[in-house]
Amino acid sequence: MGYAHSPNESLASLLTRIVARIPWRPIFQRIPGLWLVFAMMLAVFGPTRTPLLYYTYTICLNYMFLNNNIRTLQGIVHAYQETVKHACTDWLGEYLRKTGASTGDDLSHDMPYDHVLHVIIIPAYMEDLDTLCETLDILASHRRALTQYRICLAMEASEPGSDNKARMLLKLYLDSFFDITFTVHPANLPEEIRGKSSNVSWAAKQMLLRRRRRSTRHEHEIVTVMDADSCFAEDYFSAVAYHYAVASPEQRKIMMFMPSTVFDRNSDRVPIFVRVVDMYWSLGIISNMMHDSKVKMPCSAYSVSMDLCISVEFWDTGPEAIGEDLHMYLKCLFSTRGKLIIKSIFSAVSCCNVEGSYNPVTNDNSIRVRARKWISGFVARYNQAKRHLWGSLDTSYAMRRAVMGMLAPEYENYIQLKNAGISKLGKDDIGIDSNTFSPGVLACLFNRLIEAHIGMGQIGCIGLIRSFMAYYPTLEATDAFTGPLQKPFLQVFGVDINLKLLTTTVLSICTILNFLSAFYYEKYFKFVAFERWALQTLPGNNNRSTLQRRTNAAIPTAAAHGLRFSKAHENLPVYPLGRRPQLSSPRYWTNLGEWILIPYAAVFYFVVPQLNAQMCHLITDRLDYKVAAKPQVRGANCSLATLTMEEVVASAKGMCNDCSHTGGWNDNTVSHAAQVVFDVSSTNGSDCKSATSRGDEGFFEEEH
């Protein structure tokens, strides 16, 4: 077996070597599936055969459910407040106050704000040209695109003509960014499966090599990963640059950033169950974004320092990395022994709901056509949900890394941390210099993973099984329910409390918490999807009449959608966000009723996909995933708010009142970016249309 004991080798070293050679991956891969089988068997036989175990396990699951709902409510309230505050923050001004620098390129600080470069990787597989153009138009509308954005179009060799598509885009946007290029990920590389993770890994490596031709230093680079149809506001990159610049050099090497999300583009065009489950998905992301949260799991779009990418050897490319966002986070977290610094950025990324492949061009609104579109969208979201739950492989990955870290740490790839707990400004992060994984962080991590990939689905499975068994009471000896566990164990205000009543009470509390979360999500949605775009104005603009004029001009635009501004937000001095995505899906207070469907949507898009995925994991870790369809815009732009040409040029030249800096700007290079904003934003939303595009939001269908 290769475990021969050398005379000079200690017993501990021998055991470590044995542990390292155990095939942990296939073992842990099957744990979620076996766990699910156990829970289902417990639901069937537990109440009559092992009532103590059944009720104990049920109470644990209900505690997890209650804890999740409490955290979700806290998270969305926090996100709503922080998002409003974020939109009104002058991040360059904060940097100047924090560091004492005079301008953004003041070299007295070791990382000038203006020197931070954003390497933005846009993976694109079978994406429509219009989708890519809109994404690039939005990024080009940002005031620092010409000085700080390095764009990489990550194409796939398996897509015919992808290189020609990329070259066409380069010609269109060559003068819009500091740098723009493209990579073509080769097909069928050894020990790799095709998908977003392998494509992003290839692109990031190529961007590093491209940079090293001119300089070997990359501590000022931040890699941002996004979907081709995701849209960032300008203040996301401004906030990332601020947090990165004010950190110490050691801290920058272990930094990640995650934005909040909102599905605000085409939610009114998808089946109601799809809309509801995506809103709840967004809530789930937001629930772990509180600043004091020990664990923050990014989803879809996020940023990583280039130093950290290099230290962890970029993204994994095997079947285990199908959920590339969470997997990269876990890889970085374990490689830093839990000391990863991840910042919550409350600038919501605009996302699209998946749409079905059936999308006829005709205007036929017959019941048959609408039914086919509804079914197609329903099935497309199920396939996406299956891929999401296939990500339970990340729970197995975390288990393996945790076991190896405890029993055979010398076989793991760890980043050597020195003084990462002390910033240049003297702020301490307690415990960050320790070389051990904090038990609190590890416990929180597995609580969130089990909650997401195991527990919540098991609650649904057990509930469905018990509901089914209730219709067939002859299948079990119901006398077992009258045993000791049904007797009161507590009395509160004269009311006898037993385990059944306790469970019912927990579920009732969770229902109330869910509707409170829904109420705050609607407020959050209204602000991030509409109000902040209509209210954006220049930093440092204290001219009240100008601000009021811009605000009043924006209100009729929102009113056209049947929306009214919140009284507290009417005069908010929102800082520039750039161009808004074309498609928009307003929500009204009547939409609150949709949240009643959460339990049913959870069955279709959480319980059943989890059962499907984890049963498959007992046999394989490879998923033949068909790329989900996303909406595609065609026609004129329908931005609610844009920057004028004068504002973009003035800002790019550093002419703002409170953030001026010196630099050698070329007027000719600035005018193109300004022209992009000015030209594409002049029409209303009536010409916007939605079609279907197959985008790279997940894994591709495997070839056989």
Image: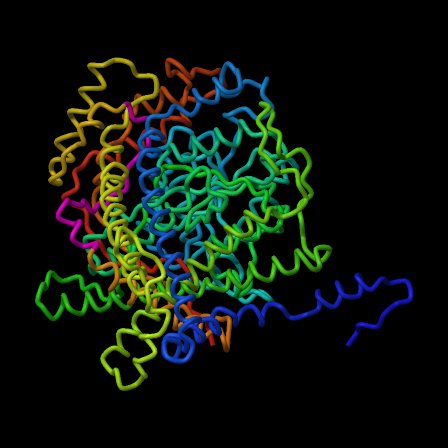
Residue 184 in sight here: no
Q: Which of 647/320 is in front? A: 320
Q: As drawn, is 414 to the left or to the right of 368?
A: right
| Residue 361 found in image quarter | bottom left
What x and y, as percent, mark residue 100?
A: 52, 15
Q: Does 226 sit above or below residue 187?
A: above
The main secondary structure of the magenta stretch is loop
Q: Position of residue 117 (x, y in %)?
A: 51, 34
Residue toward you, 454 or 171: 454
* Residue at (40, 23) in percent of width and height: 652
Specify whether residue 221 is painted magenta: no
Quarter where residue 171 is shown: top left
Relative placement, left or right, of 62 versus 13 is: left
- The number of callouts visible is 0
Is 37 or 263 nearer to us in this picture? 37
- The stretch drawn in magenta includes residue 575: yes
| Image position of 203 with respect to 103: above or below | below
| Spot occupied by residue 372 in the image (x, y as percentages of width and height) | 18, 69
- In the depicted structure, whether residue 59 falls above or below residue 620: above
- Range covered by the magenta-colored residues: 573-595
Give the percent coordinates (x, y) of residue 169. 39, 46
Q: Is residue 596 left or right of residue 69?
A: left
